[in-house]
Image: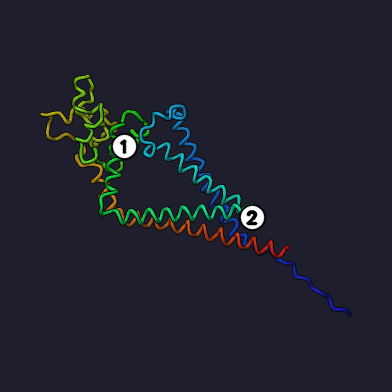
Amino acid sequence: MPAVRKYRRETSEISCCLKYLLFTSNVIIWLTALVVLSVGIWAWTEKDMFRNISKLTFIALDPAFVLIILGTITFMLGLMGSVGALRENTCLLSAYAIFLSVLLLSEIGFCGLAFVLKDKGWIKDQATEGLRAFIKHYREDPDQQNLIDWIQEDWLQCCGIDGPKDWDSNNYFNCSSIAIGSREACGVPFSCCRRRPQEVIKNKQCGYDVRKEGYPVDRNIHERGCLRAGEDWLESHLIGVAATVVGLLIMQILGICFAQNLRADIYTQKSKWH
């Protein structure tokens, strides 16, 4: 009786687990980036900035512009990763790994630079300039206004850069604006005010006249500047911030490794076909 030859069907060398893990994670990134990008474009459209680019005073501090840039970069990254994994496209996977590597190196370089310059006052100077720009253009950009209000009222519970007096650099809150009839002259925004017990709706006029001479000592506003408050917050949340940064770096490293391994598997499979 002749021997029966058994043929073993060759299975794919490409890991389905790796492929769909990379695909799923990048689809989530892609969808999140799409939402962020849409919000940024909507905010710019509401401010009519696309037709009035010249109105931008400090584009790097415009929240809508930051959302557009972050959303665009993340959208491209997620699209390359998801399509490259699903279609087993080595070119897209290579571009994804390179793009992610450049971002990773940039972030590591920025963290290293920040660590080196932390004692030289460079970071503090940049934060001061940013807050000064927010204060100066407080009434000119609703996004910047909402951001500085959130920083002062909800996040850091502070007022100004070094204190309430810094609001004198804003034309509306400058004490000299009394001459032109500004009701907010020698005052501060409502976000500088401390919330009173059992207060449901905050008084939007609580900051009026609080910097005038002869105003009662208990002004019911935050006296601490946002620069010092930010330093205190960072010191008290240092472990959490560091863990978040390290976690993001590890996720990017894993993304690069997954993309490279999947690309190598695809090359191996194609070489067997030929």
- The residue closer to the viewer here, 129 or 211, is 129
Residue 266: image quadrant is: bottom right
Q: Say whether residue 33 is left or right of residue 57.
A: right
Q: Answer yes or no: do the residues labelled 1 and 2 have beta carbons within 8 Å? A: no
Residue type at the position of mark 2: Glu
What residue lies at 36% left-to-right and 36% top-to-bottom? 58
Task: Where is residue 4? Give x, y as percent.
Answer: 83, 75
User: According to the image, label 2 marks what residue?
Assistant: 88
Residue at position x 29%, y 44% in the image:
127
**Judging from the image, what secondary structure is the residue with disc 1 in?**
helix
Reply above or below: 15 against 203: below
Q: Of 134 and 209, which appears nearest the observer?
A: 134
Q: How crowded is mark 2: few (under 14 residues within 10 Å), some or many (20 or more)?
A: some
Q: Which of marks 1 and 2 is in front?
A: 2
| Residue bearing mark 1 | 148
Q: Position of residue 73 (x, y in %)?
A: 49, 45
Label 1: how many Cα within 10 Å (few below 14, some 14–19, many 20+): many
Q: Percent position (x, y) of residue 103?
A: 46, 52
The quadrant the N terminus occupies is bottom right
Label 2 residue SS: loop
Amino acid type at circle 1 is: Ile
Quarter of the image with the C terminus in it: bottom right
Furthest-left residue in view?
214
Instruction: Measure the C-alpha gap from mark 1 to mark 2.
Output: 46 Å
Ranked by sequence position, the earlier of labels 1 and 2 is 2
Residue 212 picture location, percent across and down? 15, 28
